[in-house]
Amino acid sequence: MQKLDIETDAANAGETSLTDQLLENNRKWVRDGSPIETHGVFGDEHPVAPKLLWIGCSGSNAPPHAMVGLQPGDLFIHRNLANLAPVHDLSFQSALEYALVTLHVRHVVVVGHYGCAAVKQAMDESCGKLTRHWLATLRELALMEKAELSGFASESERLDRLCELSVLHQARCIAEARLVRDFRKKGENLTLHGWIYSKRTGLLTELGPC
Ligand SMILES: [Zn+2]
């Protein structure tokens, strides 16, 4: 499986244990079933101090905090159609800025999911005009990766691989965003991750960092 090729500072090495722990929590969640969550939902008993920016798909119905064994306030979540990270989207860029500058979040995770209907829609000419415009980068990505994608026998395998490639692509877009480059120039630590979720198994798989 292709891994995300993004440099991470040596100082970040210890920090990755947070995401390792979340992936371990996810395996436990799958093994033991979803716990019933009541703590921290109401009142101030669990102040909002997110550890991680989670960029997910609007169409994914899995509850992010429960999947990784956290409370709702532990994640700062941005969702859009097909979990994209567009450089010119004010909603996404302001969420990213808010997470880094105001909330001091130091882990950003793009979380795709296999069988994403929105990624599939990108190839469908019958979808709405705005949807088609929003998903244009996925068509470009599919074109760029045509050689690899054509090696898969079935449409569902091609779709799943495109979902993975998109996660890696979005993480690279974030790494190259001016906001993130400026942030790193100031010596701030930031780790980018690419994960993908399987609705069939409940498991999150790490695609990067390498
Ligand atoms: Zn989706």
Image (cartoon, rainbow, N blue to C red):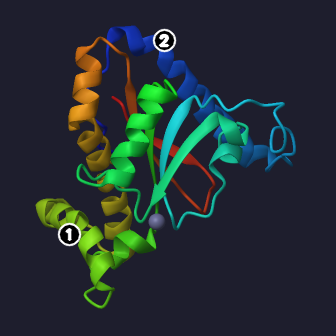
Q: Please, what secondary structure does the residue beneath circle 1 have? A: helix
The vertical placement of 43 against 114, above or below, is above
146 relative to 130 in the view: left or right: left
Within the image, what quadrant is residue 80 found in?
Answer: bottom left
Nearest the viewer among 104 and 117 is 104
| Mark 2 nearby-residue class (10 Å; few <14, some 14–19, many ≥20) | few
Amino acid type of the residue that numbered disc 1 sits on in the rendered structure: Arg
Judging by the rendered image, the residue that carries numbered circle 2 is 14
The answer to whether residue 207 is left or right of residue 124 is right
Give the percent coordinates (x, y) of residue 26.
65, 41
Identify which residue is drawn at 38% across, 23% down: 190
Residue at image coords 81%, 33%: 44
Dot label at residue 103: none
Q: Is residue 20 left or right of residue 150?
A: right
Helix, strand or loop at disc 2? Answer: helix
Where residue 5 appears, as percent x and y from the top left, is 25, 33
Residue 129: image location, x then y, percent: 27, 83
Tell me the residue that label 1 is attached to. 139
Give residue 37's position: percent from left, percent from top: 84, 46
